[in-house]
Image: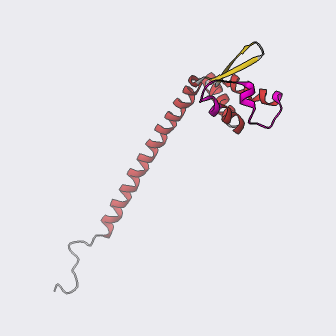
Amino acid sequence: MANQFSRLDQIFSALADPTRRAIVMRLCAGEASVGELADPFDMALPSFMKHIHVLETSGLVLSEKSGRVRTCRLSPDALLGAEEWFQQQRAIWEARLDRFEAYVMQLKKERAATKRPSRTTKRKGSE
């Protein structure tokens, strides 16, 4: 369980940076060389490689070197843990909201019941 949260922490940490999110979005379109990925960013290649390393460590990106070119590709299976976590959170919050809705409906019924005139109360002009 701790290992699962460690991996989840790595994924969320990797995606917390806008540069790394942009890299992931670019890789959604297909694999690319590090040079192609680095081109739109105004930073030195060693700095850019640190972003690639973080993405690789998290498992979101896989890379391989062929000659002098390092090619990166997305590893979507890495997001399965995050997806499961989001589904668990959604189920928890939907259950909480359902209970809250039931509570509000109960309060509305109780309020409506206290506002109704009783049958024993005489109405004006009915004498």
Tell me the residue at 69%/23% (across/down).
56
Residue range corresponding to the magenta coloring: 24-46
Depth check, front residue: 41 or 54: 41
User: In terms of image quadrants, where is residue 123?
Assistant: bottom left
Q: Which residue is drawn at 78% across and 26% down?
A: 49
Percent x, y of residue 68:
78, 16
* Side of 45 where 11 appears, left or right: left
x and y percent of residue 42 in the render?
A: 80, 38
Residue at (41%, 46%) from the top-left corner? 98
Residue 90 appears at what percent x and percent y?
A: 49, 39
Q: State yes or no: residue 37 in magenta.
A: yes
Please tell me whether residue 43 is drawn above or below residue 35 in the rendered image.
Answer: below
Residue 101 included in the magenta stretch of the image: no
Quarter residue 18 falls in? top right
Relative to 56, is 101 on the left or the right? left
User: Quarter-wise, where is residue 67 in the image?
Assistant: top right
Which of 10 and 76 lies nearest the eye of the viewer? 76
Image vertical order of residue 27 relative to residue 17, above or below: above
Q: Residue furthest left?
A: 127
